[in-house]
Image (spheres, rainbow, N blue to C red):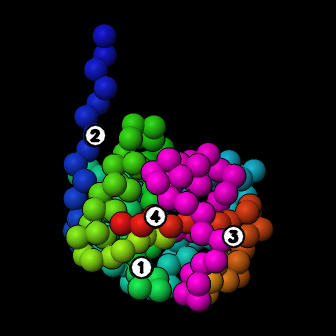
Amino acid sequence: MTLPKALPRIRTATPEDIPALPVLEASADRILEAELGNQTLPTPELTTPVEPLFILVAGNPPVGFARIDEVGGQAHLEQLSVQPDSAGRGIGRSLVEAALDAARSRGYLSMTLCTFAGVPFNAPFYASCGFEELAQPGQALGALRIHEAQLGLDGLGRRIVMRIRL
């Protein structure tokens, strides 16, 4: 009998981790692009117009990361990426839980995100983590959604805003 691999430790990203994250994200994006009918996503540098609030990584070297920004006074899960060969092991869920804990400890009352509604490892996954679709996203999130639409994300599939109260 084979025992499941232990989850990698979740930790705050160090400056040494940062150069590896765009490569990790691009690798994870290939799975998303396949799910979206092999359409190309915008490059990560275009989608993140603000400095991150914090970044958490799983493992050393990182096999996954969560980038948290602040949007409209709320913590915002800007990016969650897991290396494809490490997917399906609970790393993404562990990163989300750690990000929620970190945001809560910083005094945030909620966390938001923007995602594809119909991709199983997007909106349905986040719903399983406790996020709910937010019908009226407000001014700051509305501006972020306009930015995403300008990048062409809306042409790839229906996008929604989700929130979880902390």
How packed mark 4 is, by other alpha carbons closer than 10 Å (few <14, some 14-19, many 20 or more), is some
What residue would you read off at disc 4?
164
- Does label 2 or label 3 sit earlier along the sequence? 2
Q: CA distance from mark 2 to mark 3?
A: 31 Å
Q: How many labels were placed on the picture?
A: 4
Percent across and percent down for residue 86 are 41, 40
What residue would you read off at disc 2?
7
- Quadrant of the snapshot with the N terminus: top left
Q: Are marks 3 and 1 in contact (CB under 8 Å)?
A: no
Q: CA distance from mark 2 to mark 4?
A: 24 Å
Q: Residues in magenta?
A: 113-141
From the viewer's side, name the closer residue of 21 and 96.
96
Percent across and percent down for residue 34 are 67, 48
Q: CA distance from mark 1 to mark 2?
A: 28 Å
Percent across and percent down for residue 46 are 56, 79
Circle 4 SS class: strand
